[in-house]
Amino acid sequence: MNFDKIMARDANGSKKWNRSYIETRFGETPETIYPFFIADMDFSLPETIHKQVMKELEGDFGYFDLGASYFESIANWYKETKQVTIKNDWILPSVGTVSSIHFISKAVNNPIFGTLTPIYGAFDKMTDYYGDLHSIPLLETNKGYEIPFDLLEKELVDKKINVLLFCNPHNPSGKIWSKEELTKVVQICQEHGVLLVSDEIHSDLCHQGDQFYSLAHFFSEYSEILICSSPNKAFNLSGLNSSYVISSNLKLLQQVKVEQDKLHVSVNRIGAKYTEVVYREGTEWLEELKRYLEDNVTLLNKLLNIEGFEIERPSSGYLVWIKLPKIEDIDQFVLDVALNTGVLLESGSRFIDNYDGFIRINVATSRELLKEGLEKLTRYYKTIK
């Protein structure tokens, strides 16, 4: 597979390359741009995958019911890649992962949310529609982020939090939480009757030597766990509106399904078929992709190994969380970089709390484009020191 050759996306509506959208985010930019912000990839799946999907759909895009093969593909994927057994009826098909969290929130009586920050910015919408969201800051250490368990428990009690929104692996840093850390999180939630909602969408992109541990391993110990995931990040399918929720708590799943049914919302047919096919036939492509992405992360570490860049090397994914402690206004810095270099970065302010001085860089593009953009970034940074 040739990941050095990327898709031509500048005229197909891709937000990552669409000039109109870019102007709303970054203002004026040069003709040549380096989109390192939105969390999707510039790579296409193998043609064999696309052909297999169309073959199995046979051009029929009418009303449909999901067959057993869809559920079995997810259960087999979890068994093979996460070493955990999932039953078919533990799987609730859904639209996007964020939408799933909205349906879960609607299913909870008087939700009061807590989350460990910095965290995925979309979680902030929960407070707009359903209930308060309380931020619990992670600890910054020389080994990366750590969970402040005493503070977590105190906040759950003091703020009467009944839903913990969690990212496993952590988003934005890409850290994989250990089995021991997850065990403590589950124990605390169990002791205080807190629903644990885990976004595991980045879990299929773990780097070599880093072991992911799904919260599905704890289903037998605690029933109040819901996992939201999909192949969208690993296989670049975010535009297909297809995901799923997993829980051994069938009553809880049914409550979420009721909220879906109220809005007549269901999984996209093409997205569901892609889920099935990539989980069945995409392993070889994914392994090669991960090697390419790891090499891109290594290249970033090399090129940004200058004073002023504090890089959190991810254990999962293609998104690199970087602190620039000398930059006072990170949002203005991102706009200035875009204007002067065409390099488009994700500002830390797109996340929730404890993001001061941070940017995030997406390395899921060709190595040549990445190298050229990062060199422009470093040259510009040196001019403003």
Image: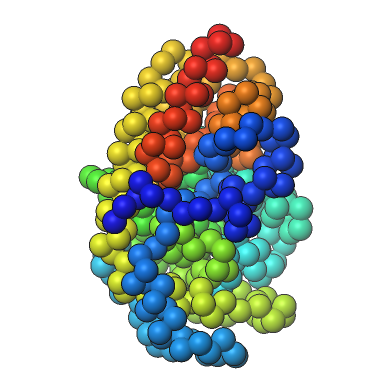
Whole-percent x and y of residue 151? 53, 37
Of residue 213 and residue 62, the one placed in the foreground of this image is 62
Residue 217 appears in view: yes
Which image quarter holds the C terminus? top right
The residue depicted at 27 percent of the width and 47 percent of the height is 291
Whole-percent x and y of residue 351? 61, 40
The residue depicted at 51 percent of the width and 69 percent of the height is 243
In this view, which residue lies farthest toward the left?
Answer: 209
The residue depicted at 38 percent of the width and 24 percent of the height is 303
In this view, which residue lies farthest toward the right?
Answer: 128
The colour style of the image is rainbow
Position of residue 345 relative to residue 108, above or below, is above
Question: In the displayed structure, does residue 108 sit left or right of residue 142?
Answer: right
> Which quarter of the picture shows residue 24?
top right
Position of residue 267 relative to residue 17, above or below, is below
Whole-percent x and y of residue 27? 73, 34
Of residue 158 and residue 299, the one placed in the foreground of this image is 299
The residue depicted at 46 percent of the width and 86 percent of the height is 57
Whole-percent x and y of residue 43? 42, 54
Question: How many numbered marks are there?
Answer: 0
> Which quarter of the picture shows residue 72?
bottom left
Which image quarter holds the N terminus? bottom left
Position of residue 175 relative to residue 1, above or below, is above
Position of residue 157 relative to residue 301, above or below, is below
Question: In the displayed structure, does residue 288 sit left or right of residue 253?
Answer: left
Residue 178 appears in view: no
